[in-house]
């Protein structure tokens, strides 16, 4: 498994490089060709970004009758640009495996594959079809893969998302916040800052006032966070700024809070009547709320953990995943069943070697029993 994971990590696959992602997809398909039928799905983006292909693997498992489907859900893309291996090589040291994408989420893909291998080698019958969907644009918002993910989820009895667990305990994830973004644009009146200052209407000053208002939309008690993350504006210091923009990240714990928040953004008005506001954006990942179906699935994982001598815990997170889409459809979804480690998206990204076997065993028991 470590050898396979090394191959996965050393086949770099940044979201922005469709050709690199395609190479990684080919690698996965090749390394599972003895146990799965592969279907490569190429989707066109409606925007300027071009993404690599998505991959659907349907595994050959023991047992003749197959009633329904278990969906494993993962992604092939990482946040790391090509060449990162030079400064972050794959290595095995201090009880860990290190490298770009090892935790998020190439370990999870390897674990799911080996869970199916374990079931085959121990001749354990599996009552449902087992599918692993590996999408290529999750780190970029799942623009081209969302419909494919929802289509597969609709055919499934349960979804296991092989994202990393929470913390060094590897807690499973039973709720995630919904994620969205807004862009607020201000068109002011440009003017020479020395010669014609009074006739200018600064878009930057207006934007500063708008950001103060936007920051009040955060409501931590309700799990709502609003973060103005990127601000752009102006051309020169001696010009009253004619334009400014702010990109805002939003997170909501409950779907019912998304529309009131949207209304607050749409209701923004200029402080300076000479300025004009344009608001765009909205929620792009619904929240994964801890429903009775998700709670029941987690309790099943706890029972499987007990059989393995493990204590399985749950967690909530502000980050989103493709599990947000499947849970919003009402499909029982359990997230965070992948690697146990730390440092996703950072130079110390790593997984614990001594948590690999139990994670694979947990996945195998879940696939067999669901």
Image (cartoon, rainbow, N blue to C red):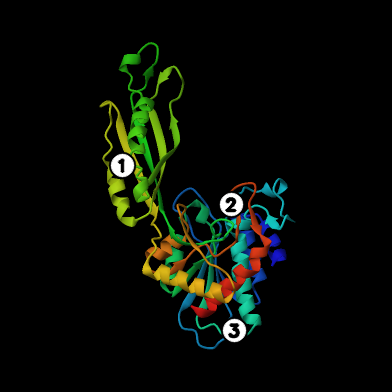
Q: Earlier in the sequence, mark 2 or mark 1?
A: 1
Q: Quadrant of residue 106?
A: bottom right
Q: CA distance from mark 3 to mark 1?
A: 54 Å
Residue lying furthest top? 195
Find numbered disc 1 in the image and state the secondary structure of the residue it sits on.
Answer: helix
Q: Nearer the viewer, mark 2 or mark 1?
A: 2
Q: CA distance from mark 2 to mark 1?
A: 31 Å
- How crowded is the residue under tag 2: few (<14 C-alpha within 10 Å), some, or many (20+)? many
Quick one: quadrant of the N terminus? bottom right
Asked whether 42 or 352 is in front, the reply is 352
Residue 65 shows in the view = yes
Residue 10 shows in the view = no
The x, y position of residue 46, in whole percent, is 44, 53
- How crowded is the residue under tag 3: few (<14 C-alpha within 10 Å), some, or many (20+)? some
The x, y position of residue 86, in whole percent, is 72, 47
The x, y position of residue 45, in whole percent, is 47, 54
| Residue holding disc 3 | 124
Q: Earlier in the sequence, mark 2 or mark 3?
A: 3
Task: Please give left or right for residue 220 compared with residue 319 in the image.
Answer: left
Label drawn at residue 344? 2
Find numbered disc 3 in the image and state the secondary structure of the residue it sits on.
Answer: loop
């Amino acid at each position: 498994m470590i050898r396979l994971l090394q191959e996965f990590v050393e086949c770099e696959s940044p979201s922005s490089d469709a050709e690199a992602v395609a190479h990684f997809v080919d690698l996965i398909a090749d390394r599972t060709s003895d146990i799965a039928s592969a279907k490569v799905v190429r989707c066109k983006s409606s925007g300027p970004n071009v993404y690599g292909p998505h991959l659907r693997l349907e595994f050959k498992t023991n047992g003749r009758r197959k009633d329904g489907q278990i969906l494993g859900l993962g992604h092939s893309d990482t946040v790391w640009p090509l060449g990162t291996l030079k400064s972050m090589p794959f290595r095995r040291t201090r009880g860990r495996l290190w490298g770009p994408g090892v935790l998020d989420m190439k370990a999870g893909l390897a674990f799911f594959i080996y869970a199916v291998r374990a079931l085959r080698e121990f001749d354990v019958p599996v009552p449902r079809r087992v599918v692993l969907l590996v999408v290529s644009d999750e780190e970029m918002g799942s623009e081209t893969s969302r419909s494919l993910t929802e289509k597969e989820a609709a055919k499934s009895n349960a979804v296991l998302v092989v994202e990393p667990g929470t913390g060094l305990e590897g807690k499973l994830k039973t709720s995630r916040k919904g994620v969205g973004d807004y862009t607020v644009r201000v068109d002011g009146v440009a003017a020479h800052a020395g010669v014609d200052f009074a006739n200018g209407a600064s878009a930057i000053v207006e934007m500063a006032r708008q950001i103060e208002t936007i920051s009040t939309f955060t409501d931590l008690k309700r799990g709502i966070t609003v973060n103005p993350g990127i601000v752009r504006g102006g051309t020169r210091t001696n010009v009253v700024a004619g334009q400014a923009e702010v990109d805002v990240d939003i997170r909501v714990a409950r779907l019912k809070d998304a529309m009131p928040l949207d209304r607050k953004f749409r209701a923004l008005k200029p402080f300076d009547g000479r300025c004009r506001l344009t608001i765009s954006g909205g929620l792009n990942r619904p929240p994964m709320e801890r429903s009775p179906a998700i709670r029941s699935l987690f309790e099943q994982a706890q029972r499987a953990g007990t059989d393995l001598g493990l204590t399985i815990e749950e967690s909530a997170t502000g980050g989103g995943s493709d599990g947000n889409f499947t849970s919003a459809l009402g499909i029982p979804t359990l997230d965070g069943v992948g690697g146990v480690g730390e440092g996703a998206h950072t130079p110390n990204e790593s997984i614990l070697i001594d948590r690999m076997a139990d994670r694979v065993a947990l996945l195998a028991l879940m696939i067999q029993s669901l």
